[in-house]
Image (spheres, rainbow, N blue to C red):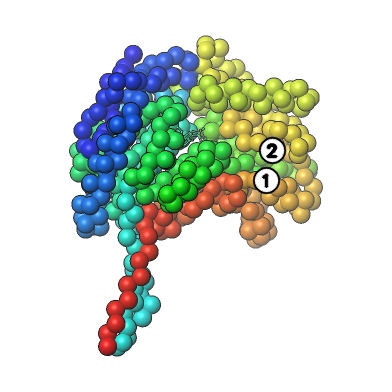
C-alpha cells in the first residue's frame, strides 16, 4: 500500500499524523492512504495563503498568466503517469483519464490568456471614471470525485490569474492525483499561492467555516451546496456553487438514428453516468421510441464495463461505495415498482462497485429514477408526442444545469433549446464545454458561474475609481 502522498502547504511537502484510506473502486480494496489534515494544518495553509496573497496580488497579471500557463504545460507532461493513478482512485479507463488531465492542462492555457476588463464610464475634462477588478483574497476550493482533476483546475486557473491564492481540497474519495499536482505545482508557484490539503468528511465543513477565506468555490451535490451557503453566510464569504443536475434530452422524430444513437448513449453513460451534465432523462418522440430504445440497449450490451486499467474497457465502476449503494437502492426501487429494466452485458463480480448499464423503459414521470439525480448508469427513457408537453416535463425539475435537443430542423431545435430552463443547452451534441464560455446552473443546480470571462470575474470584486479633473 502506498502512503507517501503529502499535502502542499506553503510550498512544502507536509505529512499528517492521521491518514484516510483510498479505495480502488474496481476492486473495492484500499490501495493507498492520504493525509488527514488537522485543524492546525488547515490554519497553517490559510495563514500561508493569506501571507502569499499580499505579494501575489502585486505580481503583474502577465507574470501570473505565464505561471498558470507553465502549470498547464506540467499537467500535460505528466498526464500519462498521472492517468494510471487517476484510474486506480477514480475508476475511469486510463485513456479517458489521460484526456481529462491533459485537457485540464490545455484549459489552463486558455484561461491564462484571459485578462479582466477595465470599463471607462467617463473620460472628460471634468471626470475620469473607471471600473476595474481586484482579487478577493484566499479562495477555499472544494472539488468532487467525478472529474477530480479538471474541476479542480477550473478553479485554480482563474483564481490564480485573478491574483488570489488558494487552498484546494479534493474529495476524500479521489485525493491522490490532486495531491501529486500540488507537489508538481510547488516548483512553479511561490510558496503559499497554491496549497493542497486532504482529509475526511470533517475537513470540508472545517474549511467553509474558517474565517480566513474570502470566497468558497464549491463543486458537488446540491444538498452539500446548501450547507456550504449556510456556513458562508456567517461571515459573508463570496460563493460559487456548481451543483447537481437532472438533465433532460429531447429527441425529435426527424433525427437520423444511425447518426445520433451512439452520441446519445455516451451523453448518458460516459464516466459511468457520473457527470453533472449527463443526460439523465431521455424524452423520445413516440414514433422513433422503440427503434432508439433497441439501439441503445444493443450499444449497452456491447459496451465493456470493467476495471479501467484493463485494455478494452469503455466504462469503469461507480466511484465509491456510498454512491454505489445509492444507485443500487434506486435500482431496487425501480424493480419494486415494477418498472421495466433493460440491461447491458456482463459486469465483473470481484468486489468492485459495478452496476450493469440500465435503460428504464418508459417509467411514469413520478418514478424516483426520473425525479432524482441517479449519478449512475440508470437512464429513464420516456415517450412523448406533443412538443409543448415535453418542454413542460423537461422543465419540471428543481434542477437546471443542462439539457439537449436532437433534431435535423435546427431552427425548431433552437426555439426549443431557448425554452429549456437550464444554464447550458446543446443541440445535436452533448457534454461540450469550453474555457471561454460560461458554465453554471439555474435553480438548485448552482449559484454563480465558472468559465468564460464571467467565471474569471467571480474571483474578483469590481472597484469604481472616480477622478475629479477640475
Ligand atoms: P458532495 O457534495 O458529496 O462532495 C463534494 C465535495 O464537498 C467533497 O470534496 C466533499 O468532501 C465536500 N463536502 C462534503 N460535505 C461538506 C460540507 N458540509 N461542507 C463543505 N464541504 C463538504 O458531492 P460528490 O458526491 O463528491 O459529487 C457528486 C455531485 O456533484 C453530483 O450531484 C454532481 O451532479 C455534482 N457535480 C456538479 C458539477 C457542476 O459543475 N455543476 C460538476 C461535477 C459534479
Give the SS element for disc 2: helix
Residue located 26% across and 36% down the image: 44
Reply above or below: 252 against 142.
below
Q: Is residue 448 left or right of residue 329?
A: left
Give the alpha-carbon distance from disc 1 to disc 2, as whole Å: 7 Å
Q: Quadrant of residue 279?
A: top right
Residue 151 % position (x, y): 42, 41
Q: Is residue 259 visible?
A: no
Looking at the picture, tell me which residue is in the foreground, 427 or 233.
Answer: 233
Residue located 66% across and 36% down the image: 372
- How many numbered dots are placed on residues in this image? 2
Quadrant showing the N terminus: top left
Q: Is residue 171 visible?
A: yes
Quadrant showing the C terminus: bottom left
Mark 2 surroundings: few (<14), some (14-19) or many (≥20) residues within 10 A = some
Looking at the picture, tell me which residue is in the foreground, 338 or 386.
Answer: 338
Q: Is residue 239 left or right of residue 164?
A: right
Residue located 59% across and 42% down the image: 245
Which residue position holds label 1?
397
Residue 43 % position (x, y): 30, 36
Residue located 59% across and 22% down the image: 325
Residue 11 % position (x, y): 21, 37
Mark 1 surroundings: few (<14), some (14-19) or many (≥20) residues within 10 A = some
Give the SS element for disc 1: loop
Q: Quadrant of residue 276?
A: top right
Which residue position holds label 2?
371
Reply above or below: 86 against 106.
above
Q: Quadrant of residue 128?
A: bottom left
Tag 1 near tag 2, CB within 8 Å: yes
Amino acid at each position: 500500500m502506498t502512503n507517501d502522498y503529502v499535502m502542499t502547504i506553503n510550498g512544502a511537502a507536509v505529512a499528517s499524523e492521521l491518514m484516510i484510506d483510498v479505495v480502488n473502486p474496481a476492486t473495492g480494496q484500499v490501495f493507498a492512504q492520504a493525509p488527514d489534515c488537522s485543524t492546525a494544518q488547515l490554519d497553517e495553509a490559510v495563514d500561508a495563503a493569506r501571507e502569499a496573497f499580499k505579494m501575489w496580488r502585486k505580481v503583474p497579471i502577465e507574470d501570473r498568466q505565464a505561471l498558470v500557463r507553465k502549470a498547464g504545460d506540467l499537467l500535460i507532461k505528466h498526464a500519462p503517469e498521472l492517468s494510471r493513478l487517476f484510474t486506480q482512485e477514480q475508476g475511469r479507463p486510463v485513456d479517458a483519464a489521460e484526456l481529462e488531465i491533459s485537457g485540464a492542462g490545455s484549459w489552463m492555457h486558455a484561461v491564462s490568456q484571459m485578462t479582466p476588463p477595465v470599463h471607462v464610464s467617463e473620460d472628460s475634462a471634468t471626470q475620469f471614471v473607471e471600473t476595474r477588478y481586484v482579487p478577493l483574497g484566499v479562495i477555499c476550493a472544494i472539488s468532487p470525485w467525478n472529474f477530480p482533476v479538471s474541476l479542480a483546475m477550473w478553479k485554480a486557473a482563474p483564481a490564480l490569474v485573478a491574483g488570489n491564492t488558494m487552498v484546494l481540497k479534493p474529495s476524500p474519495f479521489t485525493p491522490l492525483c490532486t495531491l501529486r499536482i500540488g507537489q508538481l505545482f510547488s516548483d512553479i508557484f511561490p510558496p503559499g499561492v497554491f496549497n493542497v490539503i486532504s482529509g475526511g468528511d470533517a475537513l470540508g465543513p472545517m474549511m467553509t467555516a474558517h474565517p480566513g477565506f474570502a470566497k468558497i468555490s464549491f463543486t458537488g451535490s446540491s444538498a452539500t451546496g446548501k450547507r456550504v451557503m449556510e456556513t458562508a453566510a456567517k461571515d459573508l464569504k463570496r460563493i460559487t456553487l456548481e451543483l447537481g443536475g437532472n438533465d433532460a434530452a429531447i429527441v425529435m422524430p426527424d433525427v437520423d438514428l444511425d447518426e445520433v444513437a451512439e452520441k446519445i448513449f455516451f451523453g448518458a453513460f460516459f464516466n459511468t453516468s457520473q457527470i453533472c451534465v449527463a443526460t439523465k432523462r431521455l424524452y423520445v418522440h413516440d414514433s422513433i421510441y422503440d427503434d432508439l430504445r433497441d439501439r441503445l440497449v444493443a450499444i449497452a450490451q456491447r459496451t465493456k464495463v470493467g476495471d479501467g486499467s484493463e485494455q478494452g474497457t469503455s466504462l469503469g465502476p461507480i466511484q465509491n461505495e456510498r454512491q454505489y449503494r445509492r444507485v443500487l437502492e434506486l435500482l431496487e426501487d425501480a424493480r419494486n415498482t415494477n418498472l421495466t429494466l433493460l440491461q447491458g452485458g456482463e459486469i465483473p463480480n470481484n468486489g468492485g462497485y459495478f452496476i450493469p448499464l440500465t435503460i428504464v423503459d418508459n417509467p411514469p414521470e413520478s418514478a424516483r429514477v426520473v425525479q432524482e439525480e441517479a449519478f449512475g448508469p440508470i437512464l429513464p427513457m420516456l415517450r412523448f408526442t406533443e412538443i409543448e408537453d415535453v418542454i413542460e416535463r423537461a422543465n419540471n425539475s428543481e434542477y437546471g444545469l443542462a439539457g439537449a435537443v436532437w433534431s435535423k430542423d435546427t431552427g425548431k431545435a433552437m426555439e426549443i433549446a431557448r425554452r429549456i430552463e437550464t444554464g447550458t443547452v446543446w443541440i445535436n451534441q452533448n457534454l461540450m464545454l469550453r474555457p471561454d464560455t460560461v458554465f453554471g446552473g439555474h435553480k438548485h443546480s448552482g449559484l454563480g458561474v465558472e468559465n468564460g470571462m464571467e467565471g474569471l470575474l467571480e474571483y474578483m470584486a469590481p472597484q469604481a475609481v472616480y477622478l475629479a479633473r477640475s
